[in-house]
């Protein structure tokens, strides 16, 4: 299709010939193959983005757990120090 860029009439005529005369489905035409290629590329990009977001979410979840665990340990140590200070 890039060879027809700027020549819309020629591209239209080719698509019409493929659809009408050759009885091709749109996906089997030159134009359809370019659209399919673009859709496939977009799908791959979106799948990578979703995967990256899943990794980020899991990393954040793991970090939240570690932070919570650290806070609990700090709280327990401070509670113990308070008890020791009150007893002594």
Image: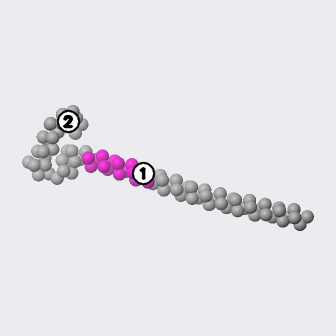
Mark sitting on residue 22: none
Residue pictured at 56% horizontal, 55% vertical? 59
Start and end of the magenta stretch? 35-50
**Where is 75 relative to 35, above or below?**
below
Residue 48 painted magenta: yes
C-alpha distance separating marks 1 and 2: 32 Å
Residue pictured at 22% horizontal, 35% vertical? 5
The single residue placed furthest to the top in the displayed view is 6
Mark sitting on residue 4: 2
Front in this rendered view, residue 31 or 87: 87
Neighbor class of circle 2 (other Cα within 10 Å; few <14, some 14-19, many 20+) is few
Q: Kindly indicate the quadrant of the structure image that contains residue 73.
A: bottom right
**Where is 54 relative to 9, above or below?**
below
Residue denoted by label 1: 48
The single residue placed furthest to the front in the displayed view is 86
- 3 sits to left or right of 51: left
């Amino acid at each position: 299709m890039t060879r027809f860029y700027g020549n819309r009439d020629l591209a239209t005529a080719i698509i019409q010939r493929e659809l009408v005369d050759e009885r091709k489905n749109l996906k089997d035409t030159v134009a359809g193959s370019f659209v399919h290629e673009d859709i496939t590329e977009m799908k791959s990009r979106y799948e990578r983005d979703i995967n990256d977001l899943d990794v980020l979410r899991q990393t954040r979840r793991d970090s939240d757990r570690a932070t919570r665990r650290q806070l609990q340990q700090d709280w327990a140590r401070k509670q113990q120090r308070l008890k020791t200070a009150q007893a002594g």
